[in-house]
Image (cartoon, rainbow, N blue to C red):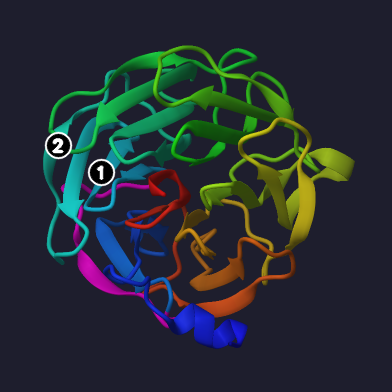
Amino acid sequence: MSVWKFMLAAPAGGPAAIGLFSGGSTASGDVNTIQKIVIPTPGNATDFGDLTVTARYTYSMSSDTRAVIAKGQNDNTMGYVTIATEGNATDFGDMSTEMYLGGGCANSTRGFMSGGLGSGNTDIIQTITIASTGNATSFGSMSGGSTFGTASCSSPTRGVNFGRWGNGPAVNFIGYFTLGSTGSEADFGDLTVGTVYGAGCSSSTRGLSMGGYSFDSGGGYLDVISYVTIASTGNATDFGDLTQAKRLNEAALSSDLIGVRGGGDSTTNTIDYVTIATTGNATDFGDLIAANEGPSGCSNAHGGLQ
């Protein structure tokens, strides 16, 4: 069976893997748009519905049935949608601390928001129970002090945070935490290049850091994809390159097979994808409805649910 035919096949015995890109900022300003893709089928994004507020630099967290999107910037509200049913978001609750420009990940029961900006840099990790509604609570803290610009992904048991920007330049630090407990982030290893504003996605075994911005060697936009084996610790390994180098909190989402990245700045509507279990450069997937800076991504089939 060819790779292409494999990608077009829906998961056996289950619904199609659906990905959502939520919020962001276009050339006209911040938007409340939720965009939908069917992950096994490359093509352009379509309209899913609207968030409760306009928002960029959001956090997205999802189970196999529900997605929760936290606004964060000048607003601590969270909204949710049922992934299988197109429509507008409903109020979920409030973040315990207003944050934006951090990383979101989840397993089948809990969502997690790592770091960000609020009244200042923050090292807080917040958590929610996805199936219920209510306010977020404190989970623990990130390593290395106050930080923002991290990218997150998860297996069913472990969350991973790629890169960050604190009181100094972007760093190559990778941290991890155990989803079933509460506590602080621990050292996982180093990225191939110091990164901020990237995107993270995963299968149940492998986590990907995609794109971002680096201050290494004079700085610049990154097209780099790096990967780690989530169950172990150690430094990231080069995976390949994105189709474009864009930095401003591009979004990523995945099934257990395919990693998809979208957006990056208000001139970029590109969506591209990789096969997570292999290595190699990304391939064009399609286009977002409009060029988009600072959306967030989630799906009903990501690696934290397997």
Q: Nearer the viewer, residue 170 or 19?
A: 19
Q: Label 2 near label 1: C-beta < 8 Å?
A: yes
**Mark 1 vs mark 2: which is more N-terminal?**
1
Residue at image position (56%, 18%) is 185
Are there few (<14), some (14-19), or many (20+) residues within 10 Å of tag 1?
many
Residue at image position (44%, 62%) is 292
Look at mark 1 in the image and give the residue it sits on. 68
Q: Is residue 48 magenta?
A: yes
Look at mark 2 in the image and give the residue it sits on. 92
Q: Position of residue 44 (x, y in %)?
A: 40, 81
Q: Quadrant of residue 272?
A: bottom right
Residue at image position (26%, 61%) is 33
Taking the image as shown, residue 213 lies to the left or right of residue 79, namely: right
Residue at image position (38%, 27%) is 99
Q: Position of residue 38 (x, y in %)?
A: 36, 73
Q: Quadrant of residue 222?
A: bottom right
Report helix, strand or loop for mark 2. strand
Q: Which residues are magenta?
A: 41-56
